Image: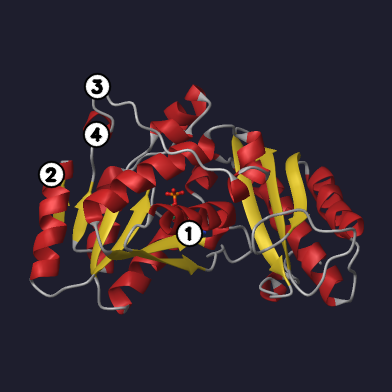
Amino acid sequence: MKRLETAAALRAECNALRRSGKTIGFVPTMGALHAGHQRLVEKSVAAGHATVVSIFVNPTQFGDPADLDHYPRSLESDLELLDATGADVVFTPSVAELYPSGEFTRVCVSGPSRGLCGASRPGHFDGVATVVSKFFALVGSCTAYFGKKDYQQWLVVRGLVRDLGFDVQVVGVATIREADGLALSSRNRRLDSNQRAQALAVVRGLCLAEQSFQAGERRVAVLRQLIVDALAEGGAKLDYAEIVSAEDLSRVPETVGKRALAAVAAHVGPVRLIDNVVLGEPSLQAYREGLEV
Ligand code: AMP
C-alpha cells in the first residue's frame, strides 16, 4: 500500500492507475477506522478497483472546535487495517495541503442538507461538500463509497456529483452494527461503559419505530414519539428525531406511505451519535430480542 501526502502525488498516482487500465474505487474517511469503514474498502476491492482511501479530519465540517480537538485519531492502526483489507493507496494530507493559506473557495449546498444534521450543525455539509469536491477533483473518474449510516451525507454527495458534474459513481453501503445493534462510529470510542449502554437507546428507538411501522402504524407523530420516549428512557439526550422522505429528506404528511426515513441524533456523555433506518426496508429485526423490542 502506498501512502501519499500531497495533492499532486495523489493526482499523479490516480492518473497513472487509470493509464495502466485500472478503475479507481475511492473511500473518504476521517480515520479512527472500524468495521464500517472496512466494509466500504472491501466493497471497492471486491469490485476490482484499485482502492484509494483518504484519512483526513476535515476542519471545515466541524462547527465546534472542541469536537474537532477530541475527534479520535489512530493513524498507525488505521494503516495496518487498510493494508490488511487490500487498499492500494492511502492519502493522508495535512490541513495546510488541502487548505493552503490564501484559499477562499467553499462549496455551498442546500436541498437535503438543510434539515436534520444540517439544522443542528450549521455549515457542516458545506464543509463536507467542499472537502469531497477537492477529493473528487484530485482522484478524477472513480466509484466512491459512502456509508448510509450518514444517510443525509450520502444524499448530499449524490446531489453534489450531479450538480457539479463530477465523473463519479456514488455507491451507498448499508450500516454496519455491533452485535447488540449499536451503529459503529469512530465516536463510540469516547463512550465509557455506562454511556455505551445509554447509546443503545438510539437504535432501540429506531427498532421500535421499525417494528411499529411493520405492524401497520403510519402516523408520523406516533412513530416519532416511540423514538423520543426510548431516548428519554435510556438516558440519551435528544437532538432530533424525524420521519422524513427517504428520497430527499423533505417533510412527509401526517401519515407516511410505503417508505420513509427515521433519523435520529442524540447526545450521550461527550458525544453526539446519529443513526437511521428506512421504514419499509426492515434491517433491525436481528437485534430486536437483545434490544428488548
Ligand atoms: P467517517 O470517517 O465517519 O467520516 O466515515 C467515513 C465513511 O464511512 C462515511 O461514508 C461513513 O458513512 C462510513 N461509515 C461510518 N460508519 C459506518 C458504519 N457503521 N457502517 C457503514 N459505513 C459507515
Q: Residue at x 63, y 42 (%)?
A: 114
Structural distance between the alpha carbons of marks 1 and 2: 25 Å
Q: Earlier in the sequence, mark 3 or mark 2?
A: 2
Front position in the image: 263 or 136: 136
Q: Amino acid at mark 4?
A: Ser
Measured in 3D between alpha carbons, the distance from the residue under mark 3 to the one under mark 2, in whole angstroms, is 17 Å
Q: Is residue 30 left or right of residue 122?
A: left
**Contact? badges 3 and 2 (CB < 8 Å):** no
Q: Which residue is mark 2?
A: 8
Q: Position of residue 192 (x, y in %)?
A: 59, 40
Where disc 1 sits, the SS reads: helix
- CA gap between label 4 and label 2 equals 13 Å
Mark 4 vs 2, N-terminal side: 2
Which circle's residue, 1 or 4, is located before the other in the chain?
A: 4
Give the mark nearer the N terminus: 1 vs 2: 2
Which residue matches tag 3? Answer: 101
Residues under numbered marks 4 and 2 in contact, where contact means CB atoms less than 8 Å apart:
no
Label 1 to label 3, Cα distance in Å? 29 Å
- Residue placed at 66% from the left, 58% from the top? 276
Q: Secondary structure at mark 2?
A: helix
| Residue 215 falls in image quadrant | bottom right
Quick check: can you spot residue 169? Answer: yes
Identify which amino acid the numbered label 3 is placed on: Ser
In this rendering, is residue 128 above or below 277?
above
Q: Residue at x 54, y 57 (%)?
A: 155
Residue beneath label 1, please? 158
Q: Please state which amino acid type lies under the numbered disc 2.
A: Ala
Q: Are marks 3 and 4 in contact (CB under 8 Å)?
A: no
Q: For mark 2, does the 10 Å Cα neighbourhood hold few (<14), some (14 to 19), or many (20 or more) residues?
A: few
Q: Can residue 30 be seen here?
A: no
Residue position marked by numbered label 4 in the rendering: 94
**The C terminus lies in quadrant:** bottom right
